[in-house]
Image (cartoon, rainbow, N blue to C red):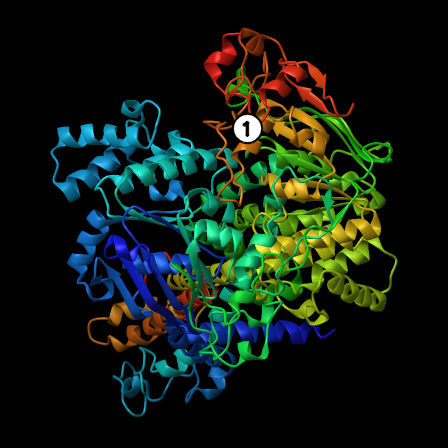
C-alpha cells in the first residue's frame, strides 16, 4: 500500500484545514519563508555570510542601504546574508530536538497511560523529576560539561555540539509531551472502541499505535508546535550565551549577543536577528493556534 | 383548533415557525414549519425523535437562539411577538413569565452554591424580596416540589443531593416566580426509571396546582402519555400531528405517530414472545436540505402515494382540536406498520444446554485505603460493586439483566467478558473456567464472547474507517484470507441492513443507529456463542431501537447465539429476554424465566421497577409504588436484606438483621426470589386489586 502517499495526503489535508483558520493563514506563510531560507538561504544570499567586505573601514557598521539592505556588522559583513544563512542550523537543530522529544514523549506517555497502575506512577514521577530542571540550565550544563570533549564516535565530531543540543532539547521536551499525551490516553482508553479492541484480543502495542495514537494526533500537533517554539527560543538563548554554533558561522542568537555593544549607534545590527527569531517563534505559535482551531480543541484564550 | 380557543386566548401561540442556522458548513433548517398552542392550565407534550427540532422550538420560545439563527413565522406570548422584544423585555419575560427546566439537573445548578441560596437569589433578583421573606419562600417552594425535609435541603450543595432531588430543586427554581409558562425539556431523561416515576408524579400534580401552561418536551411516549393533556408530534422540523392525548394514542392520524407507537415494545402483561417489532425504516429527513415540495416523511412511509411526493401536505384539521400533516390521514390505522402481534411459542424454560455460567462472582473496586497513604491502619474498604452473583445463560437464550444505575449491571457485563477482572468467583464457558482477564483467555474464548456497548459513537474508532473493526475481528477470529475477509465484511454489513459502501466511511458520517449496527456487525463477525449487550439500544431513538432489536432477534434465531442483555428499560428487556436477573446493589434480588419474574409474585424491588416504568397508554392506571433515593454505594457486607433500606414492603427488624432466604416462585422451580416475605404472601399483596403499598401497615405485621 502507498503508506507514504497516505501520510502525505493526511498532512496535506491537515495543512489545508490549518490554512482555513485566520492564525494559520498568517502563520503558515511566515514559516514557509523561514523554511525556504533554511534550505536554500545560503545560496540566495547576496554576499557571503562570513566574508568581510573590503575595505573594512568603509563598510563596517553601515546603516541599511540599497547595497546592504539590513546594513553591515562590525566586520563589514552583510547582515541580510548572515540572517539568511543563519536559519539552517537553528531550524534543523530545533526541529530535530523537538521531534525527538515529541516522539519519545508520545511513546512514553501513551504506554504509561495505557498500562496504568504502579508502572505508570513510577514513570510519571521520573517525568516530574526531569521536568523540574529548567530547560536552559540543563542545556548549559550539558554543553559546559560535554561540549568541549571529543565525540565518542569520530564521525559525529563535526556535529557534536549540535547533537548534544538535539538530545538536550529532546530530554527537556519529552516529559511535558508525555504528560499531555498520557492524560489524553487515560481518557481514550476507557472508551468503548479501545475496550472492544481488547475484547478482540489485540495486543497492547497494536492498541496503542493503531487505536489510540490516531486519536491523539490533534493534541500531538498542537503540542509539537508549542514545543518547537520553545526549542527555538532555547537554542537561540544558547547561541546568545556563546554555547551554540561557534563564530564565524552565522547564528541569530550569537549575532544578537555581539550586537549589544553597538546597540546605541548601530541598532540595525540587533534588529535583523531579533526580528528573525521573533518572526519564527510567532509563526510557529500562530500555526499552533491554527492547528488548535482546526482540530476543534479548546482554546486557552480567545485569540 | 378549538375547544381550548373557547377558554380564551392561548398563552403561547407558535405559528408557522421556521428556524434556520447559518453556519460555515451550510444552512441547517432546524425547524421548517411548526405550530402549536399552549393554554393556561394545560400540559402540552412535544414529542419526536432526536433531531426533529423539539429543543430548538423550546429555545426559540425562550428567545435563546443565537444570532446566527434566522427565525421566521410567529411566536406569540399572550399575543406579543417574542422575536420582536428588546433584550430588557426578554429578560423580564424569562425571569418572571416563562421558566425552563433542562434535561440535566446537575448542570442546571451552580456547584459552588448551596441550593437554597440559588433559589433565594432568583427571588431577590426578580421579585425584590428581602432576605427573610426569600428564605421562607424557598422552604415553601421546596415543600411544593415534595422535597423531604425542605428546611435542611436548602443548606446542601448540589452534589450532596441525588439526581431526583436536584431535579426537584430545579423545578422549584422554575416555579419561584410563579411563571405563566413552564417549559420542561426532557426533565427526566437522565434519571433512573424509579426517580423518573417520582418526578412525573410531581409534574402531574403540579399541573393541577399551578395556574400555568406547561410545554413538556420528551422523546419518550410513555412519559408523554403519563403527563400530557394534548400532544404535538414533531418530525424533521415540522409539527405533523396535534391531538388530545387519548386520541393520539388510540387513533393516530399521521403515519409517523402510528409508527412511533408501534415500535415501542408493548408493556408487560402480553404473553408469548414477539418475534418482530415494527420498525420505521431509514432515518429522520436531514436538516441540511432546502425546501421540498413533498411530504418529508414520504421516504419512510408504508402507505406513501404519488401525491405525497408532489406537494408539501398542509396541516389538515382532522377533528375538533386535532390536526395532521398528512394528505391521507383518514387512512392511518394503528396497525398500518404491520402486525406486531406475530408471536412465537416461548422457549421451554429448561433443557437448554448452559453456555455461560457465573458462579458467585464478585467484583470490588479499589483496595483498602490506609490512613497514611501506604502505611497505618486500614481505614476504607473497597467498594462492593457485585457480590456473589450467580446465573446461567442457556444456548440460544437471552438473559436480561435489569436494575437501577449503580446496581452493578455493567460491572457484571464487564466481568463476564473479562474487561474488569473478578475479585472472586468464576465464570465458565461451556463448563470450562474462563481467565479473569480477557488478555489471558484463549483465542477461541475471545471469539466466543463479544460485547456491544451503550454509546455507539464511542464504540467505533473515529479515526478509522468503518471496516476497520469488522476486518480486524475477522482476521483474529476466522481463517479467511484478506479477500475473503473483505467479502465477509460486506455480507455482515448487509446482514445488519447497511450497504457495502458504508465500509469505507468514517464513523462520524453515520447516524447513531447506523454506528450501532456496525458495532453489531463487528460482534457477529466471529460467530460468537455469547454476545453481551450493555444498554445497547438505550442511546437510540425508538424507531431505530426497534430496528436494532429486530436484528438481534433475527441473528439469534439464525445462529443460536445467546445474549446477555442489559437495560434499564423493562419493556425492552421483556421483549428480548427468556430469563431475567434483577440486580440491586450488586446482589441478585430475583431471577428466573421472564414471564415468572415479571408477573406477581415478584420481589418488592422488581415490583417497584415495574411500577415505575412509564407505559405508552394514557388510560393506564398510575401505579403507586415509588422508590425514593438511590442505590447505596457499599463498602461493608449487608447484615440483613440488601434492599431493606428502601423497601416499600419491609416487614420489620428481621429485614435488617438476617440476609433474605431464597424462595422458589410458584410457576417455575428456576424462579428464585430473595425476600423474607413468603411467596404466597407476596402474591397476595401484589394482586391487582390489593391495597396499594403502605409501609406503615406492612411493618406493623
Which residue is most to the bottom?
A66
In which image quadrant can residue A102 be found? bottom right
Counting from the top left corner in percent of width and height, residue B307 is at: 54, 79
- Nearest the eye: B138 or B447: B138
Instruction: Write the residue at 68% across / 31% down.
Output: B581
Instruction: Write the residue at 50% across / 27% down.
Output: B625
Counting from the top left corner in percent of width and height, residue B404 is at: 55, 33
Q: Please name the residue that numbered disc 1 is placed on.
A: B608
Instruction: Write the residue at 58% across / 58% down.
Output: B259
Counting from the top left corner in percent of width and height, residue B634 is at: 55, 22
Residue B326 lies, with reference to residue B138, above or below; the image says: below
- Mark 1 lies on a secondary structure that is helix
Counting from the top left corner in percent of width and height, residue A209 is at: 66, 56
- Nearest the eye: B314 or A186: B314
In which image quadrant can residue A6 be found? bottom right
| Quadrant location, the N terminus of chain B | bottom left
Residue B239 lies, with reference to residue B114, above or below; the image says: below
Left-right relation of B98 to A194: left
Instruction: Write the residue at 67% across / 68% down.
Output: B502
- Nearest the eye: B591 or B519: B591
Q: Is residue B247 visible?
A: yes
Left-right relation of A50 to B528: left
In which image quadrant can residue B207 be found? top left
Chain at numbered mark 1: B
Local packing at callout 1 (Cα closer than 10 Å; few below 14, some 14-19, many 20+) is: many
Left-right relation of B224 to B634: left
Q: Is residue B527 visible?
A: no
Amino acid at each position: 500500500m502507498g503508506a507514504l502517499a497516505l501520510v502525505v495526503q493526511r498532512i496535506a489535508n491537515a495543512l489545508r484545514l490549518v490554512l482555513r483558520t485566520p492564525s494559520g493563514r498568517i502563520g503558515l506563510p511566515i514559516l514557509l519563508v523561514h523554511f525556504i531560507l533554511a534550505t536554500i538561504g545560503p545560496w540566495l544570499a547576496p554576499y557571503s555570510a562570513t566574508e568581510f567586505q573590503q575595505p573594512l573601514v568603509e563598510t563596517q557598521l553601515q546603516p541599511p542601504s540599497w547595497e546592504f539592505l539590513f546594513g553591515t556588522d562590525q566586520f563589514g559583513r552583510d547582515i541580510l546574508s548572515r540572517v539568511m544563512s543563519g536559519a539552517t542550523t537553528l531550524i534543523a537543530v530545533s526541529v530535530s530536538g523537538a521531534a525527538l522529544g515529541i516522539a519519545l514523549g508520545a511513546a512514553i506517555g501513551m504506554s504509561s497511560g495505557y498500562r496504568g497502575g504502579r508502572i505508570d506512577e513510577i514513570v510519571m514521577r521520573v517525568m516530574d523529576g526531569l521536568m523540574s530542571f529548567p530547560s536552559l540550565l540543563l542545556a548549559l550544563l550539558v554543553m559546559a560539561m560535554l561540549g568541549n570533549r571529543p565525540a565518542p564516535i569520530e564521525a559525529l565530531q563535526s556535529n557534536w555540539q549540535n547533537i548534544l543540543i538535539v538530545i538536550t532539547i529532546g530530554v527537556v521536551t519529552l516529559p511535558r509531551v508525555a504528560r499531555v499525551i498520557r492524560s489524553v490516553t487515560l481518557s481514550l482508553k476507557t472508551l468503548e472502541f479501545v475496550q472492544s479492541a481488547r475484547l478482540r484480543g489485540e495486543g497492547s502495542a497494536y492498541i496503542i499505535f493503531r487505536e489510540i495514537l490516531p486519536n491523539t494526533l490533534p493534541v500531538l500537533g498542537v503540542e509539537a508546535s508549542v514545543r518547537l517554539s520553545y526549542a527555538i527560543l532555547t537554542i537561540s538563548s544558547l547561541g546568545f550565551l556563546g554555547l551554540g554554533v561557534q563564530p564565524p558561522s552565522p547564528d541569530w542568537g550569537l549575532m544578537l549577543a555581539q550586537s549589544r555593544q553597538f546597540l546605541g549607534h548601530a541598532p540595525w545590527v540587533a534588529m535583523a536577528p531579533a526580528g528573525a527569531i521573533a518572526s519564527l517563534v510567532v509563526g510557529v505559535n500562530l500555526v499552533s493556534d491554527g492547528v488548535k482551531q482546526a482540530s476543534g480543541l479548546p482554546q486557552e484564550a480567545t485569540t | 383548533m378549538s375547544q381550548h380557543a373557547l377558554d380564551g386566548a392561548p398563552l403561547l401561540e407558535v405559528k408557522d415557525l421556521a428556524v434556520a442556522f447559518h453556519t460555515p458548513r451550510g444552512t441547517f433548517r432546524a425547524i421548517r414549519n411548526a405550530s402549536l398552542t399552549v393554554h393556561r392550565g394545560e400540559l402540552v407534550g412535544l414529542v419526536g425523535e432526536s433531531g426533529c427540532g423539539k429543543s430548538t422550538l423550546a429555545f426559540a420560545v425562550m428567545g435563546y437562539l443565537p444570532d446566527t439563527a434566522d427565525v421566521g413565522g410567529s411566536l406569540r406570548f399572550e399575543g406579543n411577538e417574542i422575536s420582536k422584544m428588546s433584550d430588557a423585555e426578554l429578560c423580564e419575560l424569562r425571569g418572571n413569565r416563562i421558566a425552563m427546566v433542562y434535561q440535566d439537573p446537575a448542570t442546571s445548578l451552580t456547584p459552588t452554591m448551596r441550593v437554597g441560596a440559588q433559589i433565594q437569589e432568583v427571588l431577590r433578583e426578580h421579585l425584590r424580596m428581602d432576605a427573610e421573606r426569600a428564605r421562607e419562600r424557598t422552604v415553601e417552594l421546596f415543600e411544593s416540589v415534595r422535597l423531604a425535609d425542605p428546611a435542611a435541603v436548602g443548606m446542601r450543595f448540589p452534589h450532596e443531593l441525588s439526581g431526583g432531588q436536584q431535579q426537584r430543586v430545579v423545578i422549584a427554581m422554575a416555579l419561584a416566580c410563579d411563571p405563566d409558562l413552564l417549559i420542561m425539556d426532557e426533565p427526566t431523561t437522565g434519571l433512573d426509571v424509579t426517580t423518573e416515576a417520582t418526578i412525573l408524579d410531581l409534574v402531574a400534580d403540579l399541573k393541577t396546582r399551578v395556574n400555568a401552561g406547561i410545554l413538556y418536551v420528551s422523546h419518550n411516549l410513555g412519559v408523554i402519555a403519563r403527563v400530557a393533556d394534548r400532544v404535538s408530534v414533531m418530525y424533521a422540523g415540522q409539527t405533523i400531528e396535534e391531538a388530545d392525548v387519548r386520541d393520539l394514542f388510540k387513533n393516530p392520524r399521521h403515519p409517523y405517530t402510528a409508527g412511533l407507537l408501534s415500535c415501542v415494545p408493548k408493556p408487560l402483561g402480553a404473553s408469548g414472545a414477539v418475534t418482530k417489532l415494527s420498525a420505521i425504516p431509514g432515518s429522520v429527513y436531514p436538516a441540511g436540505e432546502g425546501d421540498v415540495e413533498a411530504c418529508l416523511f414520504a421516504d419512510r412511509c408504508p402507505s406513501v402515494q404519488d401525491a405525497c411526493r408532489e406537494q408539501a401536505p398542509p396541516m389538515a384539521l382532522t377533528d375538533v382540536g386535532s390536526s395532521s400533516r398528512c394528505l391521507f390521514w383518514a387512512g392511518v390505522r394503528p396497525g398500518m406498520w404491520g402486525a406486531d402481534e406475530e408471536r412465537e411459542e416461548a422457549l421451554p424454560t429448561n433443557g437448554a444446554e448452559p453456555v455461560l455460567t457465573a458462579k458467585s462472582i464478585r467484583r470490588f473496586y479499589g483496595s483498602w485505603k490506609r490512613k497514611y497513604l501506604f502505611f497505618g491502619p486500614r481505614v476504607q474498604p473497597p467498594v462492593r460493586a457485585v457480590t456473589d452473583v450467580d446465573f446461567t445463560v442457556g444456548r440460544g437464550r437471552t438473559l436480561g439483566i435489569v436494575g437501577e444505575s449503580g446496581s452493578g449491571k455493567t460491572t457484571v457485563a464487564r466481568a463476564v467478558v473479562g474487561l474488569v477482572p473478578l475479585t472472586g468467583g468464576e465464570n465458565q464457558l461451556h463448563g470450562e473456567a474462563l481467565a479473569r482477564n480477557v488478555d489471558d483467555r484463549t483465542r477461541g474464548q475471545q471469539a466466543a464472547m463479544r460485547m456491544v456497548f451503550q454509546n455507539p459513537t464511542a464504540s467505533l474508532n473515529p479515526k478509522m474507517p468503518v471496516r476497520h473493526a469488522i476486518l480486524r475481528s475477522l482476521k483474529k477470529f476466522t481463517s479467511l484470507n484478506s479477500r475473503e475477509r473483505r467479502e465477509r465484511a460486506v455480507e455482515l454489513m448487509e446482514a445488519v441492513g447497511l450497504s457495502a459502501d458504508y465500509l469505507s466511511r468514517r464513523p462520524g458520517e453515520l447516524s447513531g443507529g447506523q454506528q450501532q449496527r456496525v458495532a453489531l456487525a463487528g460482534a457477529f463477525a466471529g460467530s460468537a456463542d455469547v454476545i453481551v449487550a450493555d444498554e445497547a439500544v438505550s442511546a437510540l431513538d425508538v424507531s431505530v431501537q426497534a430496528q436494532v432489536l429486530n436484528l438481534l432477534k433475527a441473528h439469534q434465531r439464525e445462529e443460536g447465539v445467546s445474549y446477555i442483555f442489559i437495560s434499564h428499560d423493562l419493556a425492552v428487556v421483556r421483549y428480548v429476554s427468556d430469563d431475567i436477573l434483577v440486580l440491586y446493589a450488586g446482589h441478585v434480588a430475583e431471577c428466573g424465566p421472564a414471564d415468572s419474574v415479571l408477573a406477581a409474585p415478584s420481589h418488592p424491588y422488581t415490583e417497584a421497577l415495574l411500577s415505575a416504568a412509564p407505559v405508552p397508554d394514557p388510560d393506564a392506571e398510575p401505579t403507586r409504588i415509588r422508590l425514593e433515593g438511590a442505590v447505596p454505594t457499599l463498602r461493608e457486607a449487608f447484615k440483613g436484606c440488601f434492599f431493606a433500606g428502601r423497601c416499600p414492603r419491609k416487614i420489620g427488624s428481621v429485614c435488617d438483621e438476617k440476609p433474605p432466604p431464597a424462595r422458589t416462585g410458584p410457576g417455575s422451580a428456576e424462579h428464585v426470589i430473595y425476600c423474607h416475605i413468603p411467596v404466597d404472601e407476596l402474591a397476595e399483596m401484589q394482586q391487582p386489586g390489593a391495597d396499594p403499598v403502605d409501609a406503615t401497615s406492612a411493618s406493623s405485621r
